[in-house]
Amino acid sequence: MKEAIHKGYKIQAKSYESPGKGWIPSAHIMSTDGSSVTTTPMTWYPQNPINTQDEADAAAIQSAKEWID
């Protein structure tokens, strides 16, 4: 599982394989504010199939960064 930190948020890639559709980019975005943690799950459905988990994880992290921005 790939992880990244972006502007105070922790992003965990959690891509998964979908039969006949390739790998689906998915990530959890977590923000912390002192003692509490909030998690937002995000999933993207690309127009073209993604062939590997690494590519899907990279796409998930990039999309999560764009969403945070």
Image: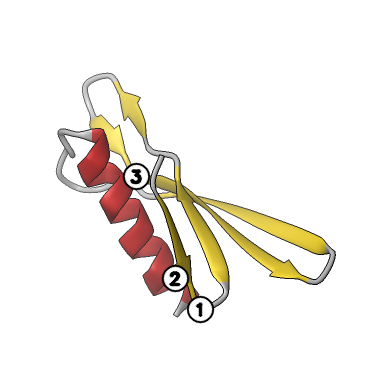
Q: Amino acid at mark 2?
A: Trp
Residue 43 point in image, percent of width and height: 44, 47
Is 61 located above or below residue 18 in the figure?
below
Q: Amino acid at mark 1?
A: Lys
Gap in angstroms between the C-alphas marked 3 and 2: 14 Å
Relative side of 4 to 55, left or right: right
Q: Quadrant of the N terminus?
A: top left
Q: Residue at x 82, y 62 (%)?
A: 36
Mark positioned earlier in the residue sequence (3 or 2):
3
Res 40 label: none
**According to the image, label 3 marks what residue?**
25
Relative side of 46 to 12, left or right: left
Dot 1: what SS?
loop
Task: Tell us which disc is closer to us: 1 or 3.
Answer: 1
Relative side of 19 to 42, left or right: left
Gap in angstroms between the C-alphas marked 1 and 3: 21 Å
Q: Residue at x 44, y 40 (%)?
A: 14
Res 7 label: 1
Gap in angstroms between the C-alphas marked 2 and 1: 11 Å
Relative side of 66 to 35, left or right: left
Residue 31 point in image, percent of width and height: 65, 66
Q: Residue at x 36, y 58 (%)?
A: 61
Q: Amino acid at mark 3?
A: Pro
Res 67 label: 2
Dot 2: what SS?
helix
Task: Tell me whether circle 3 and circle 2 mark residues in contact (CB < 8 Å).
Answer: no
Q: Residue at x 81, y 71 (%)?
A: 34
Residue 60 point in image, percent of width and height: 35, 53
Dot 3: what SS?
loop
